[in-house]
Image (cartoon, coloured by chain):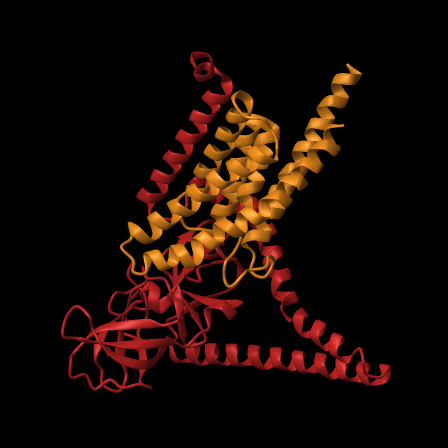
Amino acid sequence: MMAKRIFTDKVIIRRAVLAAAVLLFSILQNTPGWFPQLAGVRALIIIPLVTSIAMYERDTAGMLYGLFAGALWDITARGNSFNAIFFLITGFVCGVLINTVMRCNFITHLLLTAAATVIYNTGYWLWHYVFAGLDMKITMLLRFYIPGMVYTLLLSPVVFWLVMLLERKLRD
Amino acid sequence: MNRFLKSSGFKLFVIILSALIAGSVISVVSKSGSSPLNKAVSVVFGPASRLAGSISSSFANLPISFKSSTYYKKQAEQLKKEVDSLREQLVDYEELVHQNEFYKEFLDLKEEHTDYKFTKAAIIGRDAADKFSSFTLNKGSSGGIAVNDPVIYGKYVVGTVVSVTPTQCVVNTLLNPKTNVSAYEIRTGEVSFVTTTVEYSKQNLCVMPGLSPSTAVTAGGLVCTAGISGIYPSDLIIGSVDDIVDATADISASAIIKPGVDFSQLTDVFIITEFDGQAK
């Protein structure tokens, strides 16, 4: 009974800390002046955070963290829950892949983050530029969205390391 | 595979995904631009965004202080203190001048148009994936804000509200190619509309297409809202004419407009919630 109680408390604390991390990363990413831009390009640090958490917490918890992160992002974006849906799917798929065919390590994290980043940025670009019939589509992709993907991927090891550290500290 | 499809995790995933899609459909049908989940999350976590936004505004002057302290480190301690003190006073003074100008223009506008109802709002967030200077304000439907309400800074047009939750709203600025404002040039009276393209938006410019090939509009002319659509009241300043160029598709001319506001530097704006002739 006592052991079970301690385990429950640990899980609650871990999940609360991870939720706080999601909230902090959302604020960092979407508040003006809180995260450095490189030549006008901003990193989408929520993406590596959601994939990292989903890798450690697996499918069900991963999709709920994804939903939370996406819903927070939707506050500053106009898109009818686009981010909530995208990150719900991302969290679930990452969790399922780790459960079934992948190992939870840095290489798989990089693969999953790269896939999610490419899908998010390409989808955003297709929806907001190509389907909207705007000019300079290719320039915007090359000038902002591809550098944005690279910037996000460059930061993803740091995010993975932070989540790994939190998981190790809070699971022991 | 069957076991996966029957798992509780997958069922929960399908239920949440269906609920989110249903919420999105509701937001499209209700034309509020925000889903029920979005509204709920913004009410619960909006204060965190607002707090972050206000901290961000408060710390906007920090780089100046850091620069000055680094520079004056080499100077005598007494002189450094004096300079820092003067610098602080200067920052305070500039802030006051800036705020004074902001409120003075707003007061003029309020006195000229007694039918306008305003709400002051602060910028608390900018979507990291958006490149058209859209931003989030700390006022929502509980403060009387609705979709399509015009947003201004002094007498200058900033943009329109495109989605509203009870505590927050998202604004598309004039630098968003989806924004169209009916407009006229005040000297010649030529009427058209102001929009932008991605190319002009990148240079912080707008375009007023469809002018006659022999247009009398010249660089330096002032462009104001015409108030035709009922979204913007008439006679708000959009910006000044930067150049006149020939259209690429037809024989008309286009005026390149430099907006009167630097959207990247905005921290506070006013939302016009009511005016005579507003489209309902």
- Classify A58 as above or below B80: above
Q: Nearer the viewer, residue B119 or B61?
A: B61
Q: Residue at x 78, y 17 (%)?
A: A3
Is residue B237 in view from this perspective? no
Tell me what hue chain B is rendered in: red
Q: Nearer the viewer, residue A57 or A158?
A: A158
Question: How far across and how far down the image is residue B127, in percent?
Answer: 48, 54
Q: Residue at x 17, y 68 (%)?
A: B249
Question: How far across and how far down the image is residue B98, in percent?
Answer: 56, 79
Question: How far across and how far down the image is residue B100, in percent?
Answer: 56, 80
Colour orange maps to chain: A
Q: Residue furthest front?
A: A107
Q: Residue furthest left?
A: B251
Q: Locate residue B57: give its quadrant.
A: bottom right
Q: Quadrant of the N terminus of chain B?
A: top left
Q: Nearer the viewer, residue B67 or B196?
A: B67
User: On the picture, is B207 further left or further right than A54?
Assistant: left
- Classify A41 as above or below A20: below
Q: Quadrant of the C terminus of chain B?
A: bottom left
